[in-house]
Image: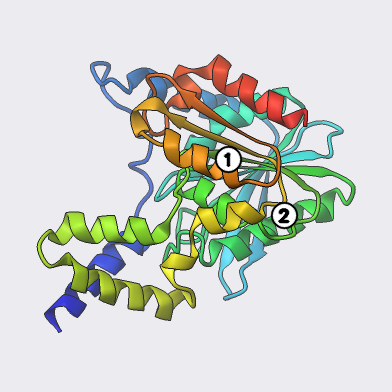
Amino acid sequence: MFEKNKANIMFNKFLGRSSIEGAYARVDESDSWYDTINTVHSSLEQIKKLPSELFEISSADGYKLKAIYYPCDSSNKTIIFIHGYKSHAERESAFPALFYRSLGYNVLIPYQRAHGISEGKYISFGALERSDLRLWVDKVNSLYSDGSIVIHGFSMGAGIALFSCNMEMKNVNHIIADAPCVSIADVLKSVCKNTFKKGYEKVEKHATERFIREFGISPSELDATKTVRESKYPILFTAGSTENMESALAELSNICPTPSRVVILDGCEHGNGMYKQTEAYQSAIVEILKQ
C-alpha cells in the first residue's frame, strides 16, 4: 500500500499540470545558457510582432486545446511545432518558427494538453497527444486541402511525433525529431528509480498500472522502435553530442523504411543545438525538406 501511495504522488507530480513560466526563463549573464536564452526571448519579441491567430480544437476527451498560428503570405506549407515536457510553447518555438517562415512556411504552435493556455489535467507523453496531433493536422487541412505539412517535435514533442509516424495523416510530408523520447516505459522507470532509489520496482509497477488506467495504453507501447519501423514519413533525427543519443538514433534510422538521416550536433546539450550549431541544424532541415 505504501508503494502505491508513493506511485500516485510521483504520478501526479510528474504528469500533472504545473506552471510553465520557468521554461526558458531569463538567466544571468554568467550562466552558460545566457546566449541561448537571450536568443529565445529576442526571437519571441520578433515573432510577436507578426500577424497571428488563436486556434482552438476540442480533444477526443473534451478538453479545449489552443494554438498560436502565424500565417506566411500566400503559402499552403505549414509547420506544426510540438513542444517539450512542461515547456512554454511560444518561447521554445519562436527561434525555429522564424527560420521556417523564412522558408515560406506557415507555423502552428499548439500548447499541448495540460500546458499553458490549453486545458487538460495530465500530460501523457503521447498516449493521448497522438490523437491531439491528428486533430491539429485536420485543422491545418481545413485551411489548405492541397497543402503540405511538416511536424517538428522537440524532446517529449519529438517522441509524440515518432509515436505518430505510423499513422495516416493527410498531407504530412516530413517529421523532424529533435532529441526525442524513445521509450516512455524507460522514462517512467528512470523517474521512479531516481526518485525512490531502493525498492523503486514496486513503485514503478503501480505507476505503470495507474498510467494504463488513466490513458488506456501501457507505457511499453509508446516506443519509437515499434512505430518508426512502420513510418510513413521521411524523418530527420537530431540531438546534441553531449546527450549520448547517437546509437539510439542510428538504430531508429536503420529500421526506418522511409528516407531518414541522423545529425549529431557537436558540443550541444539537450535543447540548444538549434542555437549553438544553427547552420548545421538548419542545413539538415533544408536538405530533408527537399526530399
- Label 1 crowd bin: few (<14), some (14–19), many (20+), radius 10 Å: many
The outermost residue toward the left is 198
> Residue at (81%, 49%) from the top-left corner?
171
- Label 2 crowd bin: few (<14), some (14–19), many (20+), radius 10 Å: many
Q: Please count the marks in the image.
A: 2
How far from the left and from the top, in percent, is residue 143?
Answer: 83, 51
How far from the left and from the top, in percent, is residue 149?
Answer: 75, 44
182 horizontally vs 1: left or right: right
The mark lying in front, picked from 1 and 2, is 1
In three-dimensional space, the C-alpha distance between marks 1 and 2, rounded to whole angstroms, equals 24 Å
111 horizontally vs 101: left or right: left
The outermost residue toward the bottom is 1
Label annotation for residue 137:
2
Q: Which quadrant holds residue 236? A: top right
Amino acid type at image mark 2: Val
Q: Nearer the viewer, residue 8 or 89?
A: 8
Q: Nearer the viewer, residue 21 or 121?
A: 121
> Residue at (75%, 37%) from the top-left corner?
71
Q: How is the image coloured?
A: rainbow
> Residue at (56%, 70%) from the top-left corner?
63
Q: Is residue 43 visible?
A: yes
Label annotation for residue 253:
1
Q: Quadrant of the N terminus?
A: bottom left
